[in-house]
Image (cartoon, rainbow, N blue to C red):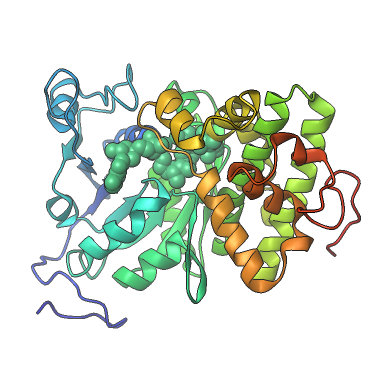
């Protein structure tokens, strides 16, 4: 049996002391590929990091019959999830999860959130005891005990410290080096947060630390539910004022929900890139918005699964499952009526309400209408 570390978690015992930081990226979707590009450009420049960056790829066979990993390593491009962008010659794609993490002491998690529980299970006992982690994943798990943020899942299952990086970060825009900002959320260790900031920062990607890991992660997670609501409004041609109202109410619910779950969450976090800026970009140009627009245009007759498969070609939505997860928490805590927007989004996604309910009073939905409803929160 593998040895355990101080957190009673199994660790990889085949370790030599590292001389430099070694980075592995777990995930190779749209954002995962852009993260690889950002990181790979920096490890070549920064002497404290190994040049080579490993990227774990969930293997798939392309229509050409070739394996995605082989194509990435031959062309230096993720032809499926980020076509047309060179990742950096020092990025090495690896379909073997264990092998990809074996020597790394900096682990970057960036997969759709629904796969993380399985990935963590596979990694128990396989990572270095001195590893640090960061999650770029916008989502959460709901367990019997209550909600579990992805950074907590990583920390608990793997016994490592886990920061988060969230922000107004539509991957395709960063891929072509358009300026944007991001927030690194950390718990206590500022030195480690600074290391992550250094690893991700480029002249076109400005990263700031924020000592509020739960606040930062909840912003990134909850904005996807508001993005679905914004998409419904677009699909119904309701205009900019309605969308602005949805964003305002959504932000209010994001803040209230976060603070009810974690009293440590800070107001100022909502003014960082991970907060209001991500909410804006996602409600204007994100994939959740786009699929929700199509859902509303079709009167809710085509499912999100169908629309996702057709419109995103393998990329994954986070907002629909997050709305379900948030709903489960609200129901369990008896908070449904305090969160009319979050509640209604889930009820529309599951076909219990029509898309137009996003701005209508309903007997099935909360007791007060969404728009113009009383301010329920402090
Ligand atoms: N794309 C963006 O613009 C963006 C920006 C910021 C944050 N994010 C967040 O980053 C996270 C990852 O998003 P993304 O855009 O990189 O991914 P994506 O939406 O492109 O998802 C596809 C990825 O999931 C993988 N996958 C499919 N089935 C799998 C399985 N069973 N197990 C493991 N992996 C599987 C695919 O191989 C592919 O790599 C999400 O939480 C997302 O919200 C995305
Ligand atoms: O395309 P979305 O809706 O998954 O959003 C992407 C990013 O989270 C925006 O910051």
Residue 236: x percent and y percent? 73, 25
* Front position in the image: 377 or 131: 377
The count of marks equals: 0
Q: Which residue is painted at 44% across and 48% down in the image?
A: 136
Please indicate, yes or no, whether residue 28 appears anywhere in the rendered image. Answer: no
Residue 317: x percent and y percent? 47, 39
Q: Quadrant of residue 133?
A: bottom left
Q: Left or right? Give the position of 217 relative to 118.
A: right
Q: Is residue 285 above or below residue 160?
A: above
* Front position in the image: 47 or 360: 360
Where, quadrant-wise, is the N terminus in this rendering? bottom left
* Front position in the image: 198 or 298: 298
Q: Left or right? Give the position of 20 relative to 13.
A: right
Please indicate, yes or no, whether residue 374 appears anywhere in the rendered image. Answer: yes
Q: Which residue is painted at 44% across and 62% down in the image?
A: 151
* Front position in the image: 104 or 347: 347
Q: Quadrant of residue 316?
A: top left
Residue 357: x percent and y percent? 76, 40
Q: Left or right? Give the position of 206 relative to 23.
A: right
Q: Is residue 309 above or below residue 247?
A: above
Q: Which residue is painted at 61% across and 32% down in the image?
A: 300
Where, quadrant-wise, is the C terminus in this rendering? bottom right
Residue 43: x percent and y percent? 28, 40
Q: Which residue is painted at 8% across and 68% down in the image?
A: 14
């Amino acid at each position: 049996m593998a040895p355990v570390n101080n957190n009673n978690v199994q660790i990889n015992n085949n370790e030599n002391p590292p001389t430099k930081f070694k980075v592995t990226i777990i995930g190779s979707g749209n954002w995962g590929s852009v993260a690889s590009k950002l990181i790979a450009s920096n490890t070549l420049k920064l002497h404290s990091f190994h040049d080579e960056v490993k990227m774990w790829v969930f293997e798939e066979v392309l229509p050409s019959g070739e394996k995605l990993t082989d194509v990435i390593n031959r062309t230096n491009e993720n032809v499926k999830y980020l076509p047309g962008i060179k990742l950096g010659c020092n990025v090495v794609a690896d379909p073997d999860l264990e092998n990809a993490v074996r020597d790394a002491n900096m682990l970057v998690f960036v997969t759709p959130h629904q796969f993380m529980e399985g990935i963590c299970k596979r990694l128990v006992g396989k990572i270095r005891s001195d590893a640090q982690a960061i999650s770029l994943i916008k989502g959460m798990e709901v367990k019997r005990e209550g909600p579990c943020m992805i950074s907590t899942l990583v920390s608990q299952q793997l016994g490592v410290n886990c920061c988060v990086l969230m922000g107004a970060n539509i991957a395709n825009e960063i891929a072509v080096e358009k300026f944007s900002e991001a927030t690194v959320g950390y718990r206590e260790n500022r030195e480690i947060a600074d290391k992550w900031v250094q690893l991700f920062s480029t002249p076109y990607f400005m990263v700031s630390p924020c000592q509020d890991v739960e606040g930062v992660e909840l912003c990134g997670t909850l904005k996807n539910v508001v993005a679905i609501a914004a998409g419904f409004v677009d699909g119904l041609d309701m205009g900019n004022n309605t969308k602005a109202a949805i964003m305002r109410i959504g932000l209010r619910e994001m803040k209230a929900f976060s603070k009810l779950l974690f009293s440590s969450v800070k107001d100022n976090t909502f003014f960082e890139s991970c907060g209001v800026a991500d909410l804006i970009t996602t409600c204007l140009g994100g994939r959740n918005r786009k699929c929700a627009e199509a859902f509303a245009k079709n009167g809710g007759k085509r499912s999100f699964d169908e629309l996702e498969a057709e419109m995103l070609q393998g990329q994954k939505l986070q907002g629909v499952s997050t709305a379900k997860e948030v709903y489960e928490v609200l129901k369990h805590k008896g908070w449904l009526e305090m969160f009319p927007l979050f509640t209604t989004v889930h009820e529309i996604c599951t076909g219990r309400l029509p898309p137009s309910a996003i701005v209508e009073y309903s007997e099935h939905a909360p007791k007060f209408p969404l728009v113009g409803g009383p301010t329920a929160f402090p």
